[in-house]
Image: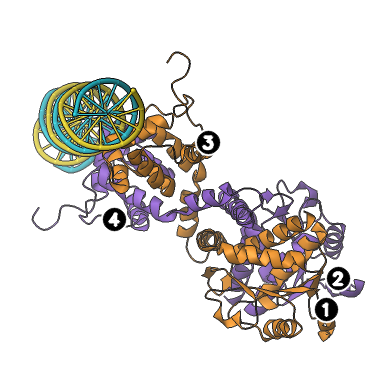
Chain colours: A orange, B purple, C cyan, D yellow
Amino acid sequence: MSKDDSELAARDTPQSVEAFRDRLTGLNGQLPRRLQQCADHIARHMDSIALSTVAQIAEGAGVPPSAVMRFCQIMGFSGYAEMQRLFREALTRAAPDYATRLANLKAGGAGRPATLVAEFVDAGRQSMEALARNLDEIALNQAVATLAQARAIHLAGFRRSFPVASYLAYVFDKLGVAAVLHDGVAGLGQRASLLPGDALIAITFAPWSEETLALAALARDRGLPVVALTDPPGTQVSAVADTVLTVAEIDFGAFRSLSAVIALALSLAVAVAARRET
Amino acid sequence: MSKDDSELAARDTPQSVEAFRDRLTGLNGQLPRRLQQCADHIARHMDSIALSTVAQIAEGAGVPPSAVMRFCQIMGFSGYAEMQRLFREALTRAAPDYATRLANLKAGGAGRPATLVAEFVDAGRQSMEALARNLDEIALNQAVATLAQARAIHLAGFRRSFPVASYLAYVFDKLGVAAVLHDGVAGLGQRASLLPGDALIAITFAPWSEETLALAALARDRGLPVVALTDPPGTQVSAVADTVLTVAEIDFGAFRSLSAVIALALSLAVAVAARRET
DNA sequence: AGCTGCATGGAATGAATATTCCATTTTCGC
DNA sequence: GCGAAAATGGAATATTCATTCCATGCAGCT
C-alpha cells in the first residue's frame, strides 16, 4: 500500500489525447469485464467524449454510470469531469475560430473571391476526411509492395490529373527513386520506355482519359504491374489495373481541390521509398 | 397579442447555424444595449458556444447571465440549452469519427503506409485552416482585379510549384481564359511571349527558385503586373511582385501537401474568370 | 463448502448550471 | 419634468449531472 497501489493504477494523469490513447492500449486485456466494455466503447468514440454526459457514455457502452466513473479513475483522472476537460481542450485547439472564419467568408456572397477560398477549403477538408475514413489499407499496402520492387516507376496522368503525376515525378526524384513522367510532349510519348521489371502508376478520374487507360492497357500487356488512382468505385479502371486505390474527391463547381489525391499519392511515394531502403 | 408579438420575436427557432447567423444579422442594430453586446460577442465566438456555459458567455460579453438568457429567447430558442444543442450538433456532424480514425491511423507506427496518409491528411487540413484564418482578402481582391484586366496570363512555377502552375493552366483553359504555362521544355522558355497587356502569376516557395524570380523580374521590367504566391512573410519576392499572396503550408517530413496553395490558386482562377465575364 | 477479496449496480448526495422572477433603473414620449 | 413601458441586475429556484457510498453478487482459493 505505502509503496505502490498496483500495476493498474498509475497516479499520473494523461496530459494529451496521445497519452490517453497509449494508456488505453496499455491497459487492454487486464481489465475486468465492465471496465473493458468502457474502454472499448471509448476507444471507438473518443471524439464524442467532449460533448457527452456520463449517462450517455454509460448507455453507449452498456454499463451503469458508476462503471464509467471507475474507468475514469483507473485512467488516472479524478473523475469524468477532468477527463472530459482533456478532450474539450483538444477540440477547441483543433478548431479555434476556423469554423467561424469559414462561415464568415462563405456568408460574404457568391461574388467575393474570399468566398471562393472558403468553398474550396471546405471541399478540400471534406475530401481529406473522406480519405481518412475510407482508405483501403490493404490495397495501399499492396500498391506499396508492388512499386517497391519495380526497377523504374512510370507515371501516367493527363489533363486534370497531370499536376498529381508531375508532383509524384518531383517527389520520386527527390527520394532517389527512378521515375518516368509520361508527359506527351511533342506527341511522342515514352511508350518504349515501359520495360520489363518496371511498374506504372495511372492517375485518372471521371471522365477517364483515353490516353491514360491506353497506356495502362499497354503496360499490362507487357506484364508490368499497374497501380491506379481513381474515383470510387474504381470499376472503370479495374480491367487494366492490378491494384486500385480510390479517392472520393469533393467537387466545388466544376473543379476539384486535388487535396486528397495528392495526400494519397505523396504517402504512396514516401512509403515506397522507405520500403526500398530497407 | 393574439396575432403577432413584435418584429423582434419571431417564434420559429433556427434549425441550422446558417439560419442562426441570418437571424443574427437581421437583428443587428435594433437591439437594446446589453442584448447587442451579447449578439456581438456571440457572432465573434460562435464556435465556442458548443462548449461554454451561460456564465462564461456572459462574462465574455460583459453582461449578467440573465441578459444572455433573454438573448437566447429573442433568437427564438426556449433557452440557452436549446441554442447550445444546435451548435453541438453542428460540431459533431463536422467531425463524425474523423478524429478517431486519424488517431487510429497515426497510432499504427511510423512504418505503415496508412500512417503516412494520416500525417499528410493532417498536414493538409492544418494548412487549409491556416489559409482560411490568415487569408489577406485585400491582396486577393487586388490580384483578381489585376489579372482580370490582363490580355493573357502567364504561369511560372518550377520544381515543387510546377504542379500548381500546371493545374492553373488546365483550369484557365477550361474557363476560356488565355494562359501560357512556362514549362521550360527543351530549355527554350517562352520569354518572348511576355507581351504588354499580359500579367504573370509566379508561384515559388522557400528555397525560392532562381528561374521563377528571374522570370518575374523580367515581366516586371517590361511593365507587366506580377502576382506572387509564396510563403509568408513574402518579403523575398516582394521586390519583383506587385501583389503578394502568402500561404503557410505545413510540411510533413520534407514534403508539403500543396492543399492550401491549390485551393488559393483555384479560387484566384475562378474569380478572375467570373470577373471577366461581367 | 466456506471464506476472502474484488467487481458490480443502484440509490443517495452534492455540485454545477440553467432558468425564472422581481425589484430597480433607464429610456422615451408627452 | 412626469409617467409608462421597456430594460436591467441579481438573487432565488429548478434541473441536470457528476460523484460517492454501500449492499449485493461472483470468483477463486483453501
Mark 2 or 4, closer to the camera:
2
Specify the label residue B39 is tagged with: none
Q: CA distance from mark 4 to mark 3?
A: 39 Å
Residue at image position (51%, 31%) is A15
Specify the label residue B184 is tagged with: 2
The answer to whether the residues at label 1 and label 4 have Cβ atoms under 8 Å apart is no
Question: Amino acid type of disc 1?
Answer: Leu
Report helix, strand or loop for mark 4: loop
Say whether mark 3 and mark 2 are on the same chain.
no
Q: Which mark sits nearer the N-terminus, 2 or 4?
A: 4
Report helix, strand or loop for mark 3: helix
Residue at image position (43%, 46%) is A43
- Identify the image quadrant of residue B158: bottom right
Could you tell me which chain the residue with mark 1 belongs to?
A
Residue linked to disc 3? A19
In the image: residue B9, left or right of residue A146? left
Q: Which mark sits nearer the N-terminus, 1 or 3?
A: 3
